[in-house]
């Protein structure tokens, strides 16, 4: 999928040709008007993060949840603390939020999760709310085929806005972990909601958990519940750095990334920001992209985008705007 832009932009060594809208016919102008803006910076610094966030933050108000992935202890690929700290301190009345896990790792119980949060340094600069610490709440899934509602961490209703701050990378079950996965799994509570999405009969036999296209559809519907709950007071930021084939839930066993760091993408459209992230990964040289692409395609991860388009969680059509 390619887009009509306003200038020529080189990303990760690949040339995107941008066609001035003044040269487009009326039909092309109309099509371009329906695209979602995705802002991009190569600046992988705290300042770069703030630059793209400020392009999408006009709807962020009140009590703000910043949804991160806290990661297993000492994971080498989690987002840099100084980057997250800078955003946290720039957003008034904000809190980092997470939920406990379904798998029995170091974030399975609230007690263990808080220890992991401390080990990884999140609580050295921010309040961290484990949203399912005190129970759950059901959020409706509008237009879903598989769910009418999904169980979420109960504290989610305490917030007026959400910033979905995502380390974009591979994922053992989802193929890739972008903004969709961050809230689909990350806002669902650890005991009920995550079981719903994984269609998991128990926590002992991981080979019985759902995989493939149906799992992608479950994730998209779970994500849509959170999107619809906060809209229009929700934005999405994908950080394309240290893109291992493994999620941050793999901790220090995560495979070393082969793909280069690319930059930061931000949008008010969850589907557009994930589509743009995938496009940038797929435009990397084959020796860098191969392992990530294999992980994504072997899990049918691209079906997240297809199904998201089908149920209207966002649009895959986007205009990429570089922020310097």
Image (cartoon, helix red, strand yellow):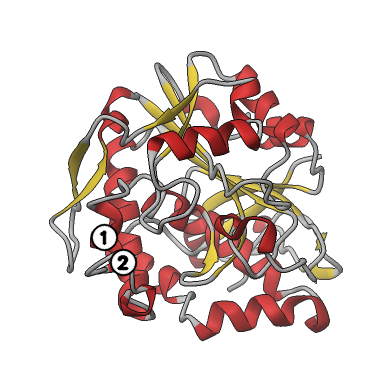
Residue position marked by numbered label 1 in the rendering: 195
Given residues 236 and 97, the one toward you in this image is 97
Answer yes or no: do the residues labelled 2 and 1 have beta carbons within 8 Å? yes
Q: Which quadrant does the C terminus fall into?
A: top right
Could you say which quadrant of the image residue 110 lies in? top left
On the image, which quarter does residue 121 sit in? top right
Residue 70 percent location from the top left of the image: 55, 42
Query: Residue 49 at x, y = what percent?
Result: 70, 36
Residue found 46% across the figure and 25% down from its top: 60
Q: Is residue 147 visible?
A: yes
Q: Residue at x 86, y 68 (%)?
A: 13
Query: In the figure, 322 relative to 82: above or below?
Result: below
Mark 1 nearby-residue class (10 Å; few <14, some 14–19, many ≥20): many
Identify the element where label 2 is drawn: helix
Q: Which dot marks residue 198?
A: 2
Answer left or right for 126 relative to 97. right
């Amino acid at each position: 999928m390619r887009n009509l832009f306003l200038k020529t932009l080189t990303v990760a060594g690949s040339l995107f040709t941008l066609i001035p809208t003044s040269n487009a016919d009326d039909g092309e102008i109309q099509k371009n008007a329906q695209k979602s803006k995705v802002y991009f910076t190569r600046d992988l610094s705290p300042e770069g993060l703030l630059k793209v966030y400020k392009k999408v933050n006009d709807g962020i108000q009140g009590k703000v949840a910043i949804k991160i992935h806290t990661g297993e202890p000492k994971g080498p690929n989690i987002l840099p603390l100084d980057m997250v700290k800078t955003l946290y301190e720039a957003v008034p009345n904000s809190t980092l939020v997470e939920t406990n896990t379904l798998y029995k790792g170091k974030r399975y119980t609230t007690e263990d999760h808080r220890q992991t949060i401390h080990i990884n340094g999140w609580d050295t600069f921010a309040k961290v709310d484990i949203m399912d610490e005190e129970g759950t709440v059901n959020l409706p899934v509008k237009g879903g085929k598989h769910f009418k509602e999904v169980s979420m961490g109960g504290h989610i209703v305490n917030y007026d806005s959400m910033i979905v701050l995502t380390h974009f990378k591979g994922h053992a079950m989802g193929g890739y972990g972008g903004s969709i996965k961050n809230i689909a799994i990350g806002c669902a509570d650890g005991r009920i909601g995550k079981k719903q999405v994984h269609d998991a009969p128990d926590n002992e036999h991981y080979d019985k958990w759902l995989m493939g296209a149906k799992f992608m559809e479950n994730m998209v519907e779970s994500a849509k519940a959170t999107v619809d709950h906060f809209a229009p007071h929700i934005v999405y930021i994908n950080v394309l750095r240290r893109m291992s084939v493994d999620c941050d839930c793999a901790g220090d066993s995560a495979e070393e990334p082969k793909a280069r760091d690319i930059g930061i993408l931000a949008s008010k459209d969850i589907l557009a920001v994930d589509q743009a992230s995938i496009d940038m990964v797929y435009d990397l040289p084959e020796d860098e992209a191969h392992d990530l692409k294999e992980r994504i395609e072997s899990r049918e991860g691209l079906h997240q985008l297809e199904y998201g388009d089908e149920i209207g969680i966002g649009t895959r059509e986007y205009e990429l705007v570089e922020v310097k």
